[in-house]
Image (cartoon, helix red, strand yellow):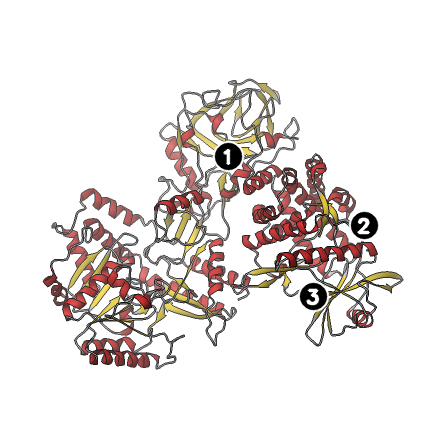
Amino acid sequence: MTAPLDEGLPRPEIDARLATELAGDRFGVSGQVQELGSQQDRNFLIQTGEGRRHLLKISNPASTRAEVEAQNAVMAAVRHAGQEAALPGLRAPRVLPSLAGREIEAVALGGREHLVRLLDFLDGEPLIGFPYAGPGTLAGLGALAGRVSVALDGLEHPGLERRLQWDLRRAPEVIESLARFVRDAGRRELVLHAARNAARRLAGLTAELPQQAVHGDLTDDNVVAVRRESGEPELAGIIDFGDAMRSWRITELVMVCTTALHREPDRPLAVLPAVTGFHRQRALLEAEVEALWPLLVLRGAVLVVSGEQQLAVDPGNDYAAEAIEREWDVFAAAESLHPAVAGAALRTALGLGHAPVQAVPAAAPGALDGPSLLPEGATGRIVDLSWESRQLRDGEWLEPGFSGADPEPTAVERRHIDAVLGSGEVAVLRYGEPRLTRAGGPGTAAPENTALFAELHSAAALEVRAPFAGTLHATGHGMLLRANDDSAALLMQGLIPGGEQPQPVRVQAGQLIGTTGALRLWHLAATALAGAGPDGSGLPAPRAFVRAAELDGWATVFADPAPFIGAHVLPAARRARRIDPAEDLARREAAFDALQGHYYQAPPQIERGWREFLIDTDGRHYLDMVNNVAAVGHGHPRLADAAADQWRMLNTNSRFHYRVVAEFSERLLSLMPPGFDTVLLVNSGTEAVDLALRLGQAFTGRPDVMCVHESYHGWSIGADAVSTSLSDNPLADETRPDWVHPVPAPNAYRGRYRGPDAGQRYAAEAEAELARLTAAGRAVGTYIAEPRNGNAGAIPTPPGYLERIYAAVRAQGGIVIADEVQVGCGRLGEMFWGFQEHGVVPDVVTVAKALGNGHPLGAVITRKEIAQALTRQGAFFSSAAGSPVSCRIGIEVLDIIEQEGLQANAAAIGERLRAGAEALAGRHRLIGAVHGRGLYQGIELVRDRETLEPAVEETRALCARMLELGVIVQPTGDRQNVLKVKPPMCLSPASADHFIEALDRVLTELGG
């Protein structure tokens, strides 16, 4: 376009009626016509009667023929590259010839010539229509932009030489010219200030930025996608080549980054996957990396001033009106991050290493044996606020009432500071520490809880001395000590200058500069001082907290002040350290066999827990919706105290005589119906099941066992033999021994029999199998099943089934085992044991998981006559089973369930979850059924509620996205399409609601 950059470009005055005439008269195409959005052109979708779709594009009259021809050439180059590489995302529309055989038709409208084309309409929808574009999608978008850049390298056309307001080379000129259209004076000044700073940073780099043909607008508006089976977007092509031009090569990446910024304006570094994706296809030069963030600021500024101008000249432009706040988000996100921070983060992500930063002044190195802020007699004690802290206990860090951005100590922090002050030592709060006290509990994003400052507190006033020579003066943020060589500065809040000193004052290293009782320190590195005025003007405002993942970038602006504090107060070994989860994962995979798998491909490193939350090394709290092992919650203080107390007294094996083993066994029997009179203690559910099977075989004298398909009972030879779940053992059908006889899972939702009589029909089928086996001389001695099929997704056993099968097994001399490992101990809410739901009483009950709350503890509860049958094979003994510590923990777990009302909580919160999930089912077609009761539920996801086709890929994608939102949930069942919902029984109403809200959000994002 050759119009002046400050001239508005209203769209052509063309409506659907005129577009229909143009399509028919010039291109011989007719059909339904629908206008699509555009900033300065007019676009119409035409759907023909034959099912074909075309785009009629009427260019703004300011576009020249050479420019439109260049757009066609760029489309052709991209399309050719995509065909050569067979890449589905690298597609572009074809230009269709008119009836006269021309690619471009000239039409006089309103006294001006307009250029008209008919294009193929690419299948899919603009990526902007997908509510969520995760890191994988952004990386793909970056890679696509890199491939486009490669495809257009070397393309020359006179129509690419354009004077276009979207050309980043002209951004400063455009912003200065159009800023007057920004009506809000505050916003206008902010845009101009940010743009001028960005232009100054860019000035020394422009000569090194390669130029070539570019698409010029590779955003989520102009990349189309189709929905995968998982619901996630798959990039399918590129549209709208109206901004094709010659410009800086990095333009393509800048445009892609704006997609990340408007989607996550509170997290500017969400651009990193797009940048790394681009870099893998089109390696970035050093100058391009340094220029990227200033260019993003300029692009954001161009978007807002141009958007405001467009609304001024074309007030009826709905497309521009809808886009304007999104464009302000882009600008605000780019402007919010210091370029040095962004540059460091980019370099780290690209593996380029940091640009050199002189962090400590050369004149006074601030080495640990050099001048320090505090006197030599002062000693420090760390107030540990990290995930490793043993000072923070019992979830106290979650006390409400703090602002994450406020550096002032919270009430909890103040308590721990005061505890140190009572000892006469200096309380030290460390730089770079992800604080639990600032994590704020569960949230949909990682918390901004990592301190960019250090803090020193003393009961008595301390002298403060300059650790290096420089100039000291007051600023609006505190006292600033700036090194003479501008290699660093210290911003100090809480420093009381000594006497009446002129401002500013020059000081020498070691000189007394004031006193303090509470000193907050920011160390401004050399990068922060570049371009700042002598009075401190232009310095970045002190930032209190950032996300842990962003610390490397921020450290180039706000570095660790520890070297200036002094080793006598803060030893180097005690500085905050950040854990690299990938490094520890590699150690795990090297030493801990992969047969023992882990959740997620790149899992967070969980090192702490509290109630229903799991906490990673960055202090982020994840809502644990899957961990039925921790029945009474993570980190319960009563359990920790009981275990420690008993361990101090005695821990040995059960062949010794001690009281607690009797107490625990009696307690378990008190929870059982009449008839149960003995307990055998083991270390796990697998051991409990294995022992129960041995009891059954010994008591009945029959080796044959009947079990249920889609079940899991454990990993030992015996327990695995009766485990029929193909998701746990894909070879179960092939390796099953001949003494194991599975019958169909009594699943009234998707099984063979459905409806109110399903239980009776499944029971009749199982009875027939029992009779067949007896007739064949293989009479079943033992029947084992969960009262509710947990592994299949909390599938209910239909009414009448267990009653009939228990009776049938016993009628022929067999016994029945209820495997309560997953559903027992009050988890179902209304009843303590799952078998109570059916009004039946088994012969043997196996229990574990919840019983030890993570401690290895299980039990087999039965009748003495059954247990004694095993004595013919010798005594039963397990070294750790029934140990004093295990028994004390078991008693404490049962006490907590009773005294804290956790069974009642499971009932109430379980109903809350069920109601929430069923309400979601009314809005989201993917939810086929909500199974379970209490806090053992399963949400089954299907693609079709009639065929019940499992939504396997959708379930996988949903679980991955829920993790990003801070919720841990996993798939279960042979089809891996059921969300297992079995959180700690202390789950709060707020956490239940948080889970439902996150689930609603993700189902919406996935189009389900």
Figure check: 260 above or below 981: above
Q: In the rendered structure, which amino acid carries the disc numbered 2?
A: Pro
Residue 158: numbered disc: 2
Secondary element at image label 2: helix
Q: In the rendered structure, which amino acid carries the disc numbered 1?
A: Phe
**What residue is shown with label 3?**
121
**What residue is shown with label 1?**
453
Would residue 573 be visible to someone looking at this image?
yes
Q: Nearer the viewer, mark 3 or mark 2?
A: 2
Specify whether 798 is left or right of 120.
Answer: left
At horizontal 29% and vertical 77% (from top left) the residue drawn is: 801
Q: Position of residue 457 (x, y in %)?
A: 44, 30
Camera-nearest residue between 831 and 248? 248
Q: In the rendered structure, which amino acid carries the disc numbered 3?
A: Phe
Q: Position of residue 396 (x, y in %)?
A: 39, 45
Secondary element at image label 1: loop
Instruction: Verify CB contact (< 8 Å) between mark 1 and mark 3.
Output: no
Which quadrant of the figure has residue 744?
bottom left
